[in-house]
Image: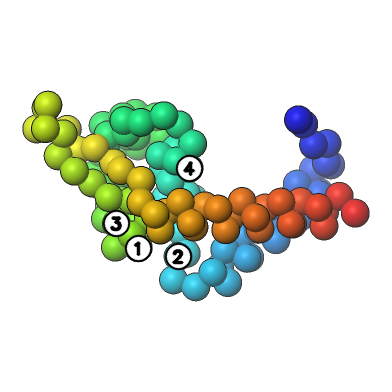
Amino acid sequence: MAIEIRAGQALKLWHDVTLELVHFGEQDLTARQMAILLTVYLEPPPHTVRGLAAKLGVTKPAITRALDTMGRMKLVDRRRDEADRRNVVILRTVDGALYLEKLADVLVEKAAEVRR
């Protein structure tokens, strides 16, 4: 279901949602961290550091730094792949799912406001 909004409305929506994210408190994510989080939760697993780096077009160390921060926030977890110990698998967490559920609620609320 497509929602039609003008460019100015889209920017207002982005602004309002981003502002609300800042108000969330400690969970202040960068654009890269948000892209990683959404990829891990919206696309089917498994997710690896290598796979995320390729998808986002950044280096593995950049993904690792982002995951370090997100791990401290308990939004994702990491485990060595038992089948191939060279790989690190990124896992979803309850806290991460709750964060995205709250984000989705804010997005729906702010989108309704923009369309009025």
Q: Is residue 19 visible?
A: yes
Residue situated furthest front in the rendering: 94
Q: Which residue, given by chain and number where applicable, does mark 1 sit on?
A: 73
Give the distance between the C-alpha atoms of the residues marked 2 and 1, in whole angstroms: 7 Å
Q: Are marks 2 and 4 in contact (CB under 8 Å)?
A: no
Other-residue count near label 1 (Cα within 10 Å), few / some / many at <14 / 14–19 / ≥20: some
Amino acid type assigned to the residue bearing label 4 in the image: Leu
Other-residue count near label 4 (Cα within 10 Å), few / some / many at <14 / 14–19 / ≥20: some
Which badge, 2 or 3, comes first in the chain's sequence?
2
Give the distance between the C-alpha atoms of the residues marked 4 and 1, in whole angstroms: 15 Å
Amino acid type assigned to the residue bearing label 2 in the image: Gln
Q: Is residue 58 left or right of residue 86?
A: right
Other-residue count near label 2 (Cα within 10 Å), few / some / many at <14 / 14–19 / ≥20: some
Q: Which residue, given by chain and number where applicable, does mark 3 sit on?
A: 71
Amino acid type assigned to the residue bearing label 3 in the image: Gly
For the N terminus, give its image quadrant. Answer: top right
SS category of the residue bearing label 3: helix
Which badge, 4 or 1, comes first in the chain's sequence?
4
Which badge, 2 or 1, comes first in the chain's sequence?
2
